[in-house]
Amino acid sequence: MLSFWNERYAANEYAYGEAPNAFLKTQLAEFPFGNILFPAEGEGRNAVYAASLGWEVHAFDQSEAGQKKALQLAQKHGVEINYFVNTEADLPYKAHQFDAMALIYAHFPGPLKSAIHQKLTPLLKPGGIVIFEAFSKKNLEYVAKNPSVGGPRDFETLFSIEEIQADFADFEPLLLREEIVDLQEGLYHNGQGAVIRFVGRKR
């Protein structure tokens, strides 16, 4: 998958646009600034937006091409982000380092996704917030009608409410629902799709 993402992010245009994810934008407005982590951040649109609000931003992705685009976007907006090229197996962070974590279309391989979530959540402080949006298993119905909506075609890589409840069992759910949304995000998220949206507070 690394070659896939490096190829996608090598283009001049931003694959998912330069604007932040709409759900993330509304949720960040609800919480005080602090340290925030963006796993699988790609080209940096969400990290740069958070930094522009005053958050201290840390991000990682396996793609060097993604990191390059993210740093260019940060420079364009006059902000700083701490962006590492790492996998989730080799992270330079400490337990309880972050006040918030944003998992925005962070689709990890099906057999690994729960284990990755369980590795990431200890990085949040007690009381820390996770903001999550990703395609649900129902999205396969929508992508069959309109491939432009994007998202994995592998059922196991997509999410269900039950999986989120299990993966974030130590969190107080502030919001958890499946929604049908109209996406307009760059080249690869366009049209109506099914997503899981979750906001939780770590107990």
Image: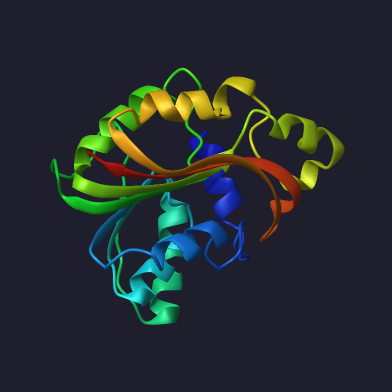
Horizontal arrangement in the rendering, residue 47 relative to residue 180 (left or right): left
- Give whichever of 26, 98 is nearer the camera: 26
Residue 199: percent from the left, percent from the top? Answer: 42, 47
Q: In the picture, which quadrant includes the C terminus?
A: top left
The residue lying furthest to the top in this view is 111
Please say whether residue 44 is visible from this viewpoint: no
Q: How many marks?
A: 0
For the question of whether residue 166 can be seen, the reply is: yes
**Residue 126 x, y percent position in the rendering:** 17, 44
The figure's colour scheme reads rainbow
Q: Nearer the viewer, residue 166 or 117?
A: 166
Q: Does 18 appear above or below 42?
A: below
Asked if 55 appears above or below 203 in the picture, the reply is below
Q: Is residue 13 left or right of 124 when viewed as pictured?
A: right
Residue at the image position 66 percent from the left and 61 percent from the top: 186
Task: Establish if 80 lies above or below 197.
Answer: below
**Lateral position of residue 63 relative to residue 196, left or right:** left
Q: Position of residue 111 (x, y in %)?
A: 46, 17
Residue at 46%, 54% (x, y): give it: 66
State the residue lying farthest toward the right. 145
- At 40% from the left edge and 57% from the top edge, which residue is drawn? 67
**Is residue 184 depicted above or below 133 in this figure?**
below
Instruction: Residue at 31% x, 36% y: name it.
Output: 171
Q: Position of residue 167 (x, y in %)?
A: 38, 27
Which one is nearer the viewer's eye here, 99 or 127?
127
Question: Could you say which quadrant of the image residue 19 lies in?
Answer: bottom right
